Image (tube, coloured by chain):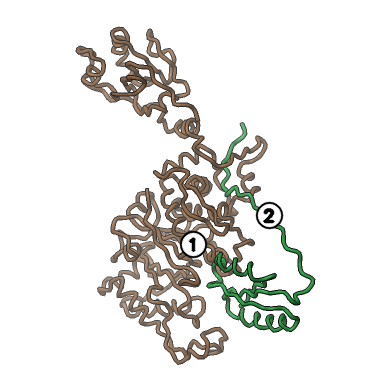
Amino acid sequence: MSAVLLDPTNERRVAEITRLTRPATLAGLTVGLLDISKARGDVFLNRLETRLVEIGAEVKRFRKPTFTKPAPVDLRHEIASQCHVVIEALAD
Amino acid sequence: MSQRPSLPNGLVAIVKRECATCVMVTPVLARIAAEVGLTIYTQDDPSFPADLTAIHDADLSVSWHHDIETVPTLLRVIDGQEVDRSVGWSRAAWQALTGIDDLGTDLSVMRPGCGSLSVDPNLEDELRARFSGSVLRARRVEIADAEDEIEALFNRGWTDGLPVVPPTEARVLRMLAGTNRAPSDIVAIVPPDLIEVTVEKVAINAVMAGCLPEYFPWVLAALEAACTNEFNIHGVLATTMPVGPVVICNGPGTRDIGMNSGMNVLGQGNRANLTIGRALQLVIRNVGGGRPGEVDRATHGNPGKLSFCFAEDELGSPWSSLAAARGIADGADAVTVFAGEGPRCVVDQLARDPDSLANTFASCLRTLHNPKLVLAFDAVIIIGPEHARVFSDAGWDRERVLQEIHSRLQISGTDLARGAHGIAEGIPGHLEHLTLPKFRPDGLLLVHAGGGAGLFSVIIGGWANGEVGSQPVTRAVRY
């Protein structure tokens, strides 16, 4: 007789979300820079901000409370509602 | 699930031939049947009792649903409801139940019955699955005849790299008997996928880990503790550092379930130690979706990520327990989860006086993760009995031991500054005028465990501590 086992997983059906089309240029767009609070992430993001401003992008800076936990939902909403694109920096 | 069979009104007896008491009361049953009427259910032999009409409870459905634990059992049923019951042979009770004053006067006053087949340990799991299987909501996965069950579980990605016990309905139902909580109860929200996990799903993974039902409350408590914002299992899982949840168990229940707190306490060979921690990690993997190479980004990991769970030796300890120090009442069972790396040994075989031994602990702890990093990491000290005796013989209690170690770990900023001693790692230069402690005030957890021979102890280094990382979390075990 074949065995019947119980599924140990969450049996989740993953919702698929289509990515936005990649913009041809960042000029004139609002770019969010998310610092995840890892050491020296700010060094990387400062350099990025300089380059982005040079090509005509508007930059908004955001910061997670700690790199060890997912970004709070309010922060994610803030970024999504204020920015066209976001760059998340991981550094050490 | 099968329907609960109703009982006929009047007197009902449940018997089996294999039971000597049932055989003995056969003439009594005949008299009851003749004088006041009796419905007899026989569990094993349909021709028993001879010369009486009996219904064969072949699938034990009547016995199971009406909680028959002993045969013979005599019931009185009115309007389909049981109103009276006598277990085994008791002349007085049977006379009262039947209203026959001189019933069984030739028999002994009483004789215990035998175990009902419906509670036979060899049948109970199968019966539980047959009659209460539908309380389980998990998807059923059929394994083909030609498929090896163990390999099938590997192939589906449901193991931690070692074989797991196939989670059949019977095994999962038996696991659920280890708790009073309903299978549908939500235990925790499990990262990284933030899934509400039910008692049933935890039970499935506990079966796979190899747990016995009596371990199950400990698995639930460990999971609850790990899935708090304070412990932050998401970060513990995702970090590149080699840490995982270390489960430290306290209370008399650790001895009831046979946990090891003594010789080879962190090693192989004890089922409870090894499977409780493993069940926790399987839930994180299978329910939470936390798998190596995905959200788990560990550079090296450590073998304790399979399972790292042990009990404190409370009976042999000169001090109060870790759980008591963390607010759990004496005599209560509790788990503490700590985000820890693998264990390392502290050797001091010449330790005879407490100051010397405290110096040894301080020197070893100083090197944790990097001798020049301070305050960022906690540690567990598992003090061996022979080391503990050095302190306790000198009259040092738990608090004194920790205070003496802390006092030896106040480090000059000039030794910690980046670049000092030819090591780039360290604290920023503007802090070098400070004296800094290696550990925050509550950053050392002291546990008494290990074998009786050996002037050794163990240190378990932690991960990023405090609100940015992980706090140790203690939870009482609920039954």
> In terms of depth relative to the viewer, which is nearer, B9 or B109?
B9
Residue B62 screen position, x and y as percent: 42, 23
Residue B321 screen position, x and y as percent: 32, 63
Q: Colour of chain B?
A: brown
Residue B152 screen position, x and y as percent: 64, 44
Q: Which residue is mark 2?
A: A16
- Tell me how many marks there are: 2
Disc 2 crowd rating (10 Å Cα; few below 14, some 14-19, many 20+) is: few
Q: CA distance from mark 2 to mark 1?
A: 32 Å
Q: Residue at x 60, y 58 (%)?
A: B291
> In terms of depth relative to the viewer, which is nearer, B374 or B66?
B66
Closer to the camera: disc 2 or disc 1? 2
Horizontal side, residue A78 vs residue B217: left or right: right
Residue B37 screen position, x and y as percent: 32, 11
Q: Are marks 2 and 1 in contact (CB under 8 Å)?
A: no
Q: Which residue is mark 1?
A: B245
Q: Colour of chain A?
A: green
Residue type at the position of mark 2: Glu
Q: Residue at x 64, y 67 (%)?
A: A80
Residue B173 against residue B29 in the figure, above or below: below
> In terms of depth relative to the viewer, which is nearer, B279 or B190?
B190
Residue B402 against residue B331 in the figure, above or below: below
Q: Residue at x 44, y 68 (%)?
A: B471
Quick one: which residue is furthest to the right in this view? A24
Horizontal side, residue B228 vs residue B23: left or right: right
> In terms of depth relative to the viewer, which is nearer, B110 or B95?
B95
Q: Chain of mark 1?
A: B
Q: Chain of mark 2?
A: A
